[in-house]
Amino acid sequence: MATELVLSAIALIGIAVIVPLIMSLAKFLGPSAGGEIKNDPYESGIKRMIGFADQKFSVKFYLLAILFLLFDIEAVFMYPWAVSIRELGWFGFTEMVVFMVLLLTGLIYILKKGVLNWR
Amino acid sequence: MTNDFMLLMPLIITGVGAIALMLIAAYDKVTIEQASMASMGVFGLAFLVQLSNTIGTAVVPYDTVFNGMLVISNFTKVAGLIILACGFFTSMSAHSYFKQNNFCTTEFYSLVAFSACGMLLLTMSQELISVFISLEIMSLAIYILVGYDRQNKRAAEAVMKYLMLGAFAGAFLTMGTALVYGGVGSTKFALIGQAVAANGFFTNPALVCGAFFILVAFLFKVAAFPFHAWVIDVYDGAAAPVTGYMATGLKTAVFAVFANFLVVDETMRAGWVNYLFYLSILTMFVGNLIAIGQTSLKRMLAASGIVHTGYLLIALVAVSSEHFSGSVILYYLGAYSVGTLGIFAALSYLGGANEKRQTFDDFKGLARVRPYSAAAIAIFLLSMAGIPPTAGFMGKLYIITSAISAGQVALAVFGIISSILSMWYYLRLIINMYFHEAVEGFEDTADFKFAPACTFILVVCVFAISLYPIAV
């Protein structure tokens, strides 16, 4: 108990010292190039943040985000399955394999269609 | 367990077929014609399996699948048959359509199969979450199909309107589901029915509000009166085979789940029937008024689709909860689907490149040049108008009979009046085809095989269905 308290206190002090130290070092040691483009607010694919909204913007980021969401959901579904894998047995295993094969076919489709090529 | 999978086999076949078509599209090895054949094969196989299920397992008329998430009954089986037939004929007529309009890719057929999957699931859903999921599977595929011609501004307008309003209706459905779950504590239709029977319907404000929201979503999807405005532009902007598919398969699926939801409980149904009474009358007459004013054929057919929704609402008012068989609704859906699919199959090859023939006047004198096509269109129109001895007449007869036997005589009278009014715009096309000299030769419509074959089969179906007797 006591050793754990000591360890966590050391960790806390370490964080309190090291993080500000690194951040201030980065400020002194790192190159600092300003500029108009660098100081612009960043939004994936949208070039002008201020002004009219009817501009064309790249759909690449959107595609990537929606694919990330898809496979993220796949991972989320796997957690409860992993917890109860013994109770579900082979039935649960087959169900999960079917689910993953379905998503895999989707992955093959988007790969063949070149959605992941960053053009 | 094995029985579950056997009953779901048509759904599995369409699902696997859709994924296979998607992968084929990714590898880009087959032509569009071959993809259309493959899609017809998938639908044909699923149809035969469903047919063997329907005839073979008549001893088990009602069965729950996957712990009551889905229910299989004779009602859902026959609705599935109609949907699979719609998918088959859509693939068939699309084969000819895309010889004149070149915006097709192989994914088109995959999407048709995916939406058929959603429709089949929707007919079997007996639980609000399944209803939402299957409705979304169906709608998302249909949205893409509507806007498939990306260079066409009218298709873009159609898909924009449909997507926005459809998403709104989907939001209503989810909100209604949440409220019903809050009021009853379950999303299963059977348990909702038990709760209503035990505690009453109007005593539970969350349930009343939730059921109202769900009805709004269903009324939107079937294009009933206050939510009918999107239909005209969307049907007009979509490609002819897609319009036919939307008008038939989608309507069959949503009416199936609508009927399943309404017969949950007698008190609940009685609560809504009063409103459905006025809604069906308004739907019929608003649809007729819109249809009379149209000059474009597809817009007229869209408006007449609203009128047919009105007739189906009469059937919904007239169903009784104690011995619900849904045979009248399914019969009418089958008869209406055959007529509508037939006309859109004919439009698929008669429309010409980029659907250049759109108005009534464009089809003047068709009977002089293409007598068989004109005869087929005339038969479909007469079936939709309800002239004996076609399927449409028998469907209307059963609906009016069931309305009278349910004590809704006023509704039956309004149905007959609306049917007479609808002659105006159906006969107008027949007059244009038969009593005018041909202004052009329709030469570009000569060498197609699939869509004309499709119209021929459907003409046979119009008479075959009218000979099939049902018990009202």
Image: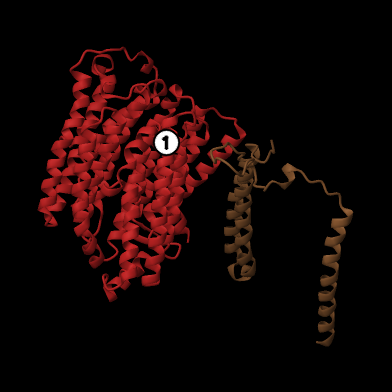
Chain colours: A brown, B red
Residue B226 in sight in this render? yes
Above or below, comparing residue B60 to residue A1 in the picture: above
Residue at disc 1, secondary structure: helix
Residue B165: x percent and y percent? Answer: 39, 47
Going 11% across and 57% down the picture, which residue do you hit? B407
Above or below, comparing residue B134 to residue B241 in the picture: below
Above or below, comparing residue A5 to residue B255 in the picture: below
Going 17% across and 47% down the picture, which residue do you hit? B398
Residue B313: x percent and y percent? Answer: 23, 50
Residue B127 in sight in this render? no
Above or below, comparing residue B196 to residue B467 in the picture: below
Q: Amino acid at mark 1?
A: Glu
Residue B242: x percent and y percent? Answer: 40, 35
Viewer-side residue, B51 vs B198: B198
Q: Quadrant of residue B277?
A: bottom left
Q: Residue furthest bottom?
A: A2
Left or right: A50 as drawn, with respect to B348: right
Going 54% across and 41% down the picture, which residue do you hit? A53
Q: Quadrant of residue B431?
A: top left
Q: Quadrant of residue B425?
A: top left
Viewer-side residue, B472 vs B49: B472
**Within 10 angstroms of label 1, few (less than 14), some, or many (20 or more) residues?**
some
Q: Which residue is mark 1?
A: B157
